[in-house]
Image (cartoon, helix red, strand yellow):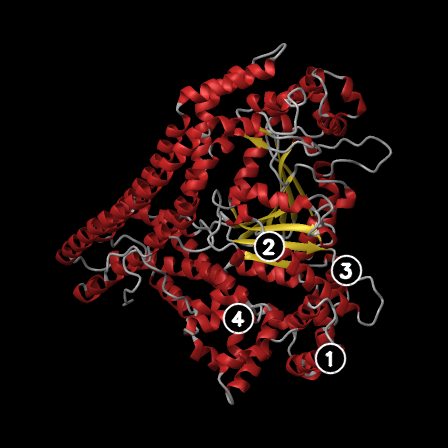
């Protein structure tokens, strides 16, 4: 077993896989792993609970290593209550009690920690000194330094050089946040879960206050002050007018789908009361109905600022809940809300670089809300599917949400982690072994959920290692809040209390978010970038070395041209592979186009007379039909269905070149792009500071990888978007048919156009054009940005007028040493020696 595999495997077996990246960043191999001391653990595992578990198992492992081969015997140290319970479950609880007792006895010997020793290691002091906090402080100090330098530069004359340096400093602060999408039906416990994770009891409205129908709630950190802030963004006046026209227009047609009408009536009654059902569009759009929210007509966001989360929750209830418990009419504005942003103070450790988004499962019929929904889902780094544990397997809705949204966060997005979160795991039993019963039930549910996930073949198509990115949690928000309220003084903390807290698994989700924040890497990147900028300023204040500059510039530009040619040639490979796959998909689509069309327009088991409204709506919305929340009809996307054969033909190649769950070949090419500058340090010692600047130009790679993700999403949806564009004329014409037999007329219109428009060949061309644009973008950006950096750093005359930043430069160097900043992967040479 390789050293790196040893560390990865042992952390996985200890259920500490979320910390693998920290060990890899510190280059911990098998030998150094066994040499770790307890004072090293804090940097590697900043959360107290997992760190305690690691410390105990690490001590046992080192003791075993004295007497036996670790690779063969470390399994003993990983024995857990969970595995014992799983064994009981798999045997139908028929395992002999003596065997179970023996296992539990052995487990207690291994995991038992002396109570007095446990008390000495206090949670509060440990958490307050976590690596995340230290990294945040280091980054904050570096920011102050760079803000001071920026102010000095603002006082200087504007030149090409000073403008360039200012832009580089501004780029340091452009830090993209990771997004976690939280899905689940109303009543699943999403709001309670988010509240518990953030340490809030009454921030987000829970299910018993009313369903949060189509309101997207975005929760992030307030990094400015200690206030609770809500920002409500409304749909446009035009959008609401069109939605009302659609609602009232549907009411004038035959009402085959009574549930749709009921849902639409609910919107009217929420906003206008029962009287609104008798008014026309013009009356409903009268500004008097919106006197309490003037921001709606002025197209502004409404901002609410409060001192407590509970106060904010009360004030935003009318924008989130879909019904009121009051006997008198209370105007509710949720039908007008596009998105609600909540900013929470004192949440830097969890949300400084992370955003939680509570999302409806399948988008929205409103176009602007649906566009925002797709954007949110496509930007999710992680997805949480929330379900009541009692219905985690039997309830179809959670799995349908996963199945219907995976194209948007999978191949069409950037998700790297899927978690199924089973809520409401509270054990009401008063038996002495209630905890054991609860843990056994939880482990059994986890195994069943994993088995269910393994059956989701459509989900697996979007990831190269779907099982590797799937996690299951069994949580109890209620129990966690109870334990936190009874949290003892640090001197009184017991192992029993710690176990009860961690049994709720809320701390595991907090650790997940903390890890997603990635404080160490972000701090390292910021300080390293600051070091490069200050090196450039220092270098330009030194004496001129025209000959050396000219020679080094020629060396760099020659290497740049060679490397760019190599990059362009590599990018031809995915184009060629996709061309072959798409050609096969075009033929299959053309051979089966009638079948594909009829599967949507004439589904089996549904009569034409009862389906004409769906087809009509589908044509009016250019091939897409989104039913209301209560409708028994499923979502329909004719464009996507027509593209399905082509999509299947490219599926493997797409996940190979553009995977979410690992580094794909194109991303790897960008990250490993180098001009091999190691030799230049010896050849041009006098220009070492300029090389330091050039090698820390990491934001170019960061931006290119960001661009790769965005263009990858566009390329994935090119097929269905191209078909939608090709069919647009026929959709419009078909939607205009009325009278007797208009259903057949609509179908004929669509069939005839599909045969003539050559839609599959056009879709193939559009996707290949997207790949060509991606190649050109990567090569051109590398060429332009690197040539600019080389020119600025090596051709610009020395500028003695630049501010003296010697003190700032030395402070950044001190921060690098104190923070143990690992040199970033450089744009010139990831292996270049720093001078």
Question: From the viewer's perspective, is the residue at label 3 or at label 1 nearer?
Answer: 1
Does residue 287 appear in the picture of this structure? yes
Looking at the picture, tell me which residue is in the foreground, 261 or 92.
92
Q: Are marks 3 and 4 in contact (CB under 8 Å)?
A: no
Query: At which x and y percent is residue 784?
Result: 27, 44
Give the residue pinned by disc 3.
426
Q: Position of residue 559 (x, y in %)?
A: 20, 53
Going from the N terminus, do you reach mark 3 or mark 4 first? 4
Against 457, residue 634 (above or below) is above
Q: Residue at x 46, y 51 (%)?
A: 660
Please identify the residue farthest to the left as the structure is shown.
547
Q: Identify residue for label 1.
A: 101
- Are the residues flagged by discs 3 and 1 in contact, CB closer than 8 Å? no
The alpha-carbon separation of the residues under discs 1 and 4 comes to 27 Å
303 above or below 9? Answer: above
Indicate which label's residue lies in the foreground, 2 or 1. 1
Real-space CA distance between mark 2 and mark 1, rounded to the nearest whole angstrom: 33 Å
Residue 346 seen in this snapshot? no
Cα distance between the residues tagged 2 and 3: 20 Å
Q: Residues within 10 Å of mark 1 (few under 14, many from 20)?
A: few
Disc 4 element: helix
Which is nearer the eye, 565 or 313?
A: 565
Label pair 1/4, CB-CB below 8 angstroms: no
Identify the residue at horizontal 53%, vertical 29% (top origin): 638
**Is 105 placed above or below 781 here?**
below
Query: Quadrant of residue 88 in the image?
Result: bottom right
Please name the residue that numbered disc 4 is placed on. Answer: 11
Q: How many angstroms separate mark 3 from mark 4 (CA)?
A: 29 Å
| Residue annotated with mark 2 | 419
């Amino acid at each position: 077993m390789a050293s790196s595999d040893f560390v990865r495997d042992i952390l996985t077996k200890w259920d500490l896989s979320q910390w693998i990246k920290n060990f890899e960043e510190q280059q911990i191999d098998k030998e150094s792993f066994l040499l770790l001391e307890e004072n090293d653990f804090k940097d590697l595992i900043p959360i107290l609970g997992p760190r305690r578990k690691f410390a105990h198992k690490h001590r046992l492992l080192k003791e075993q290593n004295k007497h036996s081969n670790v690779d063969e015997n470390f399994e003993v140290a990983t024995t857990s209550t969970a595995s014992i319970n799983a064994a009981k479950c798999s045997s139908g609880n028929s395992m002999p009690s003596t065997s179970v007792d023996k296992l539990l006895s052995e487990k207690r010997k291994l995991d038992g920690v002396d109570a007095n020793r446990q008390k000495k290691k206090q949670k509060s002091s440990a958490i307050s000194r976590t690596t995340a906090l230290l990294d945040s402080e280091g980054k904050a100090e570096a920011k102050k330094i760079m803000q001071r330098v920026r102010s000095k530069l603002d006082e200087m004359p504007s030149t090409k050089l000073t403008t360039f340096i200012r832009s580089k400093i501004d780029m340091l602060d452009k830090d993209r946040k990771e997004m976690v999408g939280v899905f689940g039906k109303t009543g699943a416990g999403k709001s309670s879960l988010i509240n518990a994770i953030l340490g809030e009891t009454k921030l987000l409205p829970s299910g018993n206050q009313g369903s949060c129908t189509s309101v997207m709630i975005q929760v992030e950190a307030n990094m400015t002050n200690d206030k609770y802030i809500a920002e409500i963004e409304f749909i446009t006046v035009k959008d609401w007018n069109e939605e009302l026209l659609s609602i009232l227009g549907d009411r004038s047609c035959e009402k085959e789908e009574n549930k749709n009408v009921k849902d639409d009536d609910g919107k009217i009654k929420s906003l206008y009361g029962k009287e609104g059902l008798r008014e026309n569009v013009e009356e409903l759009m009268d500004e008097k109905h919106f006197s309490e929210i003037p921001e709606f007509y002025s197209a502004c966001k409404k901002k609410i600022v409060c001192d407590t989360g509970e106060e904010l929750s009360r004030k935003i209830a009318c924008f989130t809940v879909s019904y009121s418990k009051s006997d008198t009419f209370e105007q509710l504005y949720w039908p007008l809300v596009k998105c609600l942003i909540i900013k929470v103070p004192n949440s830097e450790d969890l949300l400084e670089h992370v955003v939680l988004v509570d999302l409806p499962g399948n988008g929205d019929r409103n176009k602007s809300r649906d566009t925002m929904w797709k954007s949110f889902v496509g930007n999710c780094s992680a997805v949480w599917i929330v379900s009541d544990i009692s219905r985690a397997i039997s309830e179809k809705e959670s799995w349908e949400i996963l199945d219907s949204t995976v194209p948007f966060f999978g191949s069409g997005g950037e998700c790297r982690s899927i978690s199924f979160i089973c809520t409401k795991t509270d054990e009401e039993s008063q038996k002495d072994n209630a905890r054991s019963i609860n843990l056994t039930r939880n482990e059994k549910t986890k195994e069943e959920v994993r088995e269910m996930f393994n059956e989701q073949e459509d989900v697996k198509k979007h990831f190269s290692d779907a099982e590797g990115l799937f996690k299951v949690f069994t949580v109890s928000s209620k129990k966690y809040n109870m334990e936190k309220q009874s949290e003892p003084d640090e001197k009184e903390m017991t192992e029993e209390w710690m176990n009860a807290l961690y049994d709720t698994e809320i701390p595991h989700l907090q650790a997940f978010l903390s890890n997603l924040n990635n404080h160490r890497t972000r701090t390292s990147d910021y300080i390293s970038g600051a070091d490069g900028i200050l090196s450039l300023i220092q270098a330009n204040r030194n004496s001129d070395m025209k000959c050396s500059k000219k020679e080094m510039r020629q060396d760099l530009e020659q290497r740049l041209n060679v490397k760019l040619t190599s990059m362009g040639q590599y990018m031809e490979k995915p184009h060629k592979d996709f061309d072959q796959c798409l050609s096969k998909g075009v033929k299959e689509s053309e051979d089966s186009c009638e079948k594909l069309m009829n599967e949507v327009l004439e589904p089996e088991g549904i009569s034409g007379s009862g389906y004409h409204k769906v087809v009509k709506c589908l044509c009016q919305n250019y091939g897409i039909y989104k039913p209301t929340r209560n409708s028994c009809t499923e979502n329909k996307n004719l464009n996507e269905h027509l593209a399905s054969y082509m999509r299947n033909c490219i599926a493997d190649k797409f996940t190979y070149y553009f995977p979410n769950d690992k580094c794909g070949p194109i991303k790897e090419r960008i990250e490993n792009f180098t001009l091999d500058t190691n030799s230049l340090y010896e050849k041009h010692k006098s220009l070492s500071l300029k090389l330091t600047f050039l090698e820390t130009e990491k934001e170019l790679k960061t931006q290119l990888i960001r661009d790769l993700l965005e263009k990858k999403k566009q390329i994935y949806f090119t097929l269905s978007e191209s078909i939608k564009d090709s069919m647009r004329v026929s959709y419009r014409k078909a939607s205009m048919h009325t009278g007797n037999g208009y259903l057949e007329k609509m179908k004929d219109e669509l069939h005839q156009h599909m045969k003539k428009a050559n839609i599959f060949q056009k879709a193939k061309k559009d996707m290949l054009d997207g790949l060509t644009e991606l190649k050109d973008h990567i090569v051109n950006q590398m060429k332009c940005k690197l040539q600019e950096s080389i020119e600025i750093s090596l051709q610009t005359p020395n500028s003695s007028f630049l501010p003296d930043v010697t003190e700032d430069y030395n402070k950044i160097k001190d921060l690098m040493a104190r923070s143990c900043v690992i040199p970033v992967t450089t744009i010139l040479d990831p292996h270049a020696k720093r001078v």
